[in-house]
Image: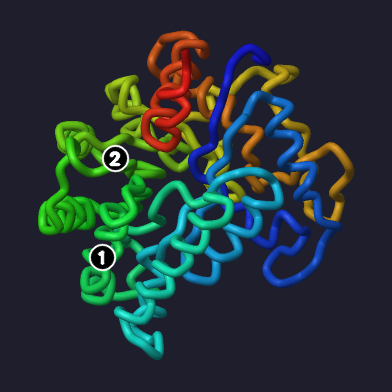
């Protein structure tokens, strides 16, 4: 495993669980340093911290600076109500995101993608379709303005259709835009085909591997369009998931020891139900098993794709 290189393109390191707080109650001391160190010790060299709102994007930048990582900046579709509620409206909210990106460019250049943005029709109690759709074009256009790839969210078949329409509306063109990934993908193979034809990448995590139908889709995703993520602390693989049968065997060095309850946390261990970026190799192994190919093939493809989308300067600087 040590010779393989991994990237977690979606990790919510600003989530309170990584400082020991669950549902507003502190259960253990912060183990954020250990979480990052564990990931790096298992070959996860790059981690992209997700920015899901204006405040979370600011927090993501600060954390990325502290740990020498990178992050996104944007507004998750379920958070778009705060755009409508902003004192300056959409224009004022976007202006603050612009200011954040511009300040980061003058400082540490930690923001390497615009996101998380998109559409989520499974959780309309957070933001209506109309609210999400009203603010999406302005968020998408930040990608072209700053020449940063898009980190997209799409949940629900109709959301996929409307997201594709929104991309076309703002003039999406894979040849002139800086690229995009639909992360935490749970859609159909026809949706994959459409996204791939448009030049987008597909991000896979535990939520992408729940059902037999999911696994059938994963089997047919082209390797040159595949990216790997954990979406930690969310999207763990449970015993009810179809992918559970593809997990590494007990005793595998890929597996992380986990305590059953947060209050029983101990040094060096994870927490059951809390995903960590060090588990990227496990997602890669499951994908390899489903596709019937080696872990090395999946790891190398995902790493190369990650560099192409998020770190093109590293490819350009390679002798």
Which quarter of the figure is the N terminus placed in?
top right
Res. 238 in view: no
Query: Quarter of the image holding residue 306?
Result: top left
- Horizontal side of 173 relative to 61 (left or right) equals left
Q: Is residue 47 above or below residue 105?
A: above
- Residue 202 sits in which quadrant? top left
108, 228: nearer the viewer:
108
How far apart are the alpha carbons under marks 1 and 2?
Answer: 17 Å
Mark identifier at residue 179: 2
- Across and down, in percent, residue 313 comes to 43, 31
Which residue is denoted by mark 1 in the rendering? 136
Image spot of residue 228 (x, y percent) = 47, 32
| Residue occupying the point 71% across, 41% down | 36
Identify which residue is drawn at 48% across, 55% down: 105
162 left or right, relative to 10: left
Residue at the image point whose x is 38% and y is 86% from the top: 85
Q: In the depicted view, which residue is nearer to us: 211 or 276? A: 276
What secondary structure is marked by label 1?
Answer: helix
- For the rendered model, the colour scheme is rainbow
For mark 2, give the secondary structure.
Answer: loop
Give how far across and how far down residue 67 sits, in percent: 69, 46
Is 251 drawn above or below residue 184 in the view shown? above
User: Is residue 126 shown to the viewer in this render?
Assistant: yes
Q: Which numbered disc, 1 or 2, marks the residue that appears first in the sequence?
A: 1
């Amino acid at each position: 495993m040590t010779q393989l290189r991994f990237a977690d393109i979606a990790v919510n390191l600003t989530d309170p669980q990584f400082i020991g707080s669950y549902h507003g109650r502190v259960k253990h001391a912060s183990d954020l340093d250990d979480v990052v160190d564990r990931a790096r010790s298992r070959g996860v060299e790059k981690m992209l911290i997700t920015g899901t709102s204006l405040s979370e994007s600011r927090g993501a930048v600060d954390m990325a600076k502290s740990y020498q990582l990178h992050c996104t900046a944007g507004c998750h579709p379920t958070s778009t109500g705060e755009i409508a509620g902003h004192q300056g409206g959409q224009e004022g909210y976007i202006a603050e995101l612009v200011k954040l990106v511009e300040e980061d460019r003058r400082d540490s250049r930690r923001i390497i993608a615009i996101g998380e943005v998109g559409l989520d029709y499974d959780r309309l109690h957070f933001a209506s379709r109309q609210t999400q759709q009203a603010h999406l074009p302005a968020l998408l256009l930040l990608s072209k303005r700053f020449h940063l790839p898009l980190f997209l969210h799409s949940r629900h078949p109709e959301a996929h259709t409307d997201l594709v329409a929104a991309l076309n509306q703002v003039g999406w063109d894979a040849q002139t835009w800086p690229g995009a990934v639909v992360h935490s993908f749970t859609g159909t193979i026809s949706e994959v085909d459409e996204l791939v034809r448009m030049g987008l990448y597909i991000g896979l995590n535990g939520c992408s591997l729940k059902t037999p139908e999911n696994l059938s889709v994963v089997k047919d995703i082209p390797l040159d369009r595949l990216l790997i993520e954990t979406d930690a602390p969310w999207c763990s693989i449970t015993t009810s998931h179809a992918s559970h049968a593809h997990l590494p065997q007990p005793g595998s060095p890929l597996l992380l020891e986990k305590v059953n309850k947060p209050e029983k946390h101990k040094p060096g261990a994870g927490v059951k139900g809390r995903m960590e970026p060090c588990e990227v190799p496990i997602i890669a192994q499951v994908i390899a098993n489903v596709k019937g190919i080696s872990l090395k093939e999946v790891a190398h493809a995902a790493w190369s794709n990650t560099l192409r989308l998020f770190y093109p300067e590293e490819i350009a600087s390679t002798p």
